[in-house]
Image (tube, grey):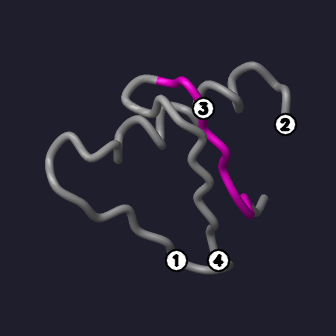
Amino acid sequence: MYIEKVKIEHFRIFGDKVEIFFQKGLNMLIGENNSGKTAIIDAIRLVMSLGTY
């Protein structure tokens, strides 16, 4: 499976619409504390668990 991009809106710390693009291969989320790294992973997990992808 390949995730090309993630759109997040009104989820945890993301109030406005945020689009994150991934490339094939290895991707890393790097940032300061409370920058939303875990929120991105949680958003992906939520959608995958709902089966609406």
Say which amino acid is labelled 3: Glu
Return the residue at label 3: 9
- First in residue order: circle 3 vs circle 4: 3
Tag 2 secondary structure: loop
Residue in the foreground of this view, choosing between 25 and 12: 12
Query: Is residue 6 covered in magenta?
Result: yes
Residue type highlighted by circle 4: Gln
Left or right of residue 27, residue 45 in this image: right
**Residue 25 placed where, x, y %?**
61, 80
Q: Which residue is drawn at 67% across and 45% down?
A: 7
Residue 17 in magenta stretch: no
Residue that lies at the very extreme toward the top in this rendered image: 50
| Label 1, label 4: how far apart the Cα atoms are | 8 Å
Of the image marks 2 and 3, the number of the one nearer the N terminus: 3
* Number of callouts: 4
What residue sits 47% from the left and 29% below the top? 15
User: Distance of mark 2 from mark 4, alpha carbons?
Assistant: 18 Å
Which residue is farthest right? 52
Residue occupied by mark 2:
53
Marks 3 and 4 sit apart, C-alpha to C-alpha, by 21 Å
Single out the mark in the foreground, 3 or 1. Answer: 3
For the record, the magenta segment spans 3-11
**Alpha-carbon span between mark 2 and mark 3:** 16 Å
Q: Which type of secondary structure does the marked residue at label 1 adopt?
A: loop
Work out how far the residue at label 1 is from the one at label 2, CA to CA, in angstroms. 21 Å
- Distance from the alpha carbon under mark 3 to that under mark 1: 25 Å
Identify residue type, mark 1: Leu
Task: Specify the amino acid type for callout 2.
Answer: Tyr
Residue picked out by circle 1: 26
Q: Dot 3: within a 10 Å radius of its alpha carbon, few (fewer than 14), some, or many (20 or more) residues?
A: few
